[in-house]
Image (cartoon, rainbow, N blue to C red):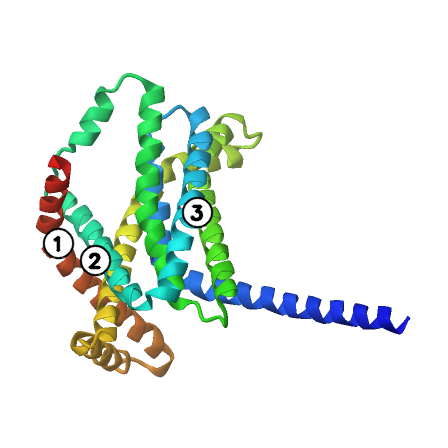
Amino acid sequence: MSGLLALLDDVAGIAKVAAASVDDVAAAAGKAGAKTAGVIIDDAAVTPKYIQGFDPARELPIIWRITRGSLFNKIILLLPVAMLLANFAPWAVTPLLMLGGGYLCFEGAEKIFHVLFPHGSHEIEEDMEDKDPSHLEEQKIKGAIKTDFILSAEIMTIALAAIEVPNVWMQAATLAVVGIGVTVAVYGSVALIVKMDDVGLFLAKNAPTPVGRGLGRGLVKFMPVLMWILSVVGTAAMLWVGGSIVIHGLEVLGFGWLGHHIHDWAYAIGHMVPVGWTAIVEWSAKATMDGIFGVALGFLLIPAVLAATRVFAKA
């Protein structure tokens, strides 16, 4: 009997340790996930463009296929690579973060350049000439998964740099939780956004009250505005996150001049306002300066990236 009680006591102790580990993983995942907010916003803002133009009945199946591709990117491809880097080449994490940050700056600056100097897209023209809907759907899904891979790599690298757990298994579990949670959040939001106009149209036609029909019409009218807001917020988030990643990476590599000056300037701006507003004004000032740096870096990278793209395309 005493042996059974001792066994039960050991099982209870193991259960407590396991529960504590789960809590630690959840806490670490929440902290790491918060660091990726800017890239998540951009991911949610970018994806709906791949669904536009398809029959409403195909929208959710397309989103589901992109979601599966995103999970494959994060859990099967990127998670093992991230763990190998973290445990065998930790020195490579900062340069890779900076590379991803530079790409975000390029993407944000390219969007601004396209608004300022509109130009046609050869890929879009080819898509419009494609008369086979199933082929076009396959191409769109492949394009979305490729874009997701780049954004997922940035999300996983940012999360990896923010994870502080005692062993490699908890590190892997935390990263997996972040990857799954981010994917569910992003593509769940995309599904809601994409189907919102259908919900509005249904309410406008079938709601039993004038208020419900008016709400439906309002949703239909608001969706283009929401898409524009998402595009603007996504671009701003890319530039802010990308700029801050590169600046922080320079500090880690021993080139902290710019980061220190931005911190000092933001601190000075924050202390120009009443005490209750100091923190938010200081954060806003720093984010704005990081974003300005991101814009400048992005515009510098545009010709280099386009030249490299042409070289790879020819190869």
Task: Give the percent coordinates (x, y) of residue 304.
Answer: 10, 50
Tell me which amino acid carries mark 3: Ile
Q: Is residue 225 visible?
A: no
**Please, what secondary structure does the residue beneath circle 1 have?**
helix
Q: Earlier in the sequence, mark 2 or mark 3?
A: 3
What residue is pinned by disc 2?
102
Look at the picture and state if 64 lies above or below 166: above
Residue 196 or residue 95, whichever sits in front:
95
Inter-mark Cα distance, 2 to 3: 25 Å
Please tell me in which quadrant of the rendered image residue 187 appears.
top left
Badge nearest the viewer, 2 or 3? 3
Is there a contact, CB below 8 Å, between mark 2 and mark 1?
yes
**Please, what secondary structure does the residue beneath circle 3 have?**
helix
What residue is pinned by disc 3?
76
Tell me which amino acid carries mark 2: Gly
For label 1, the crowd category at 10 Å Cα-Cα, with few meaning under 14, some 14 to 19 and many 20 or more, is some
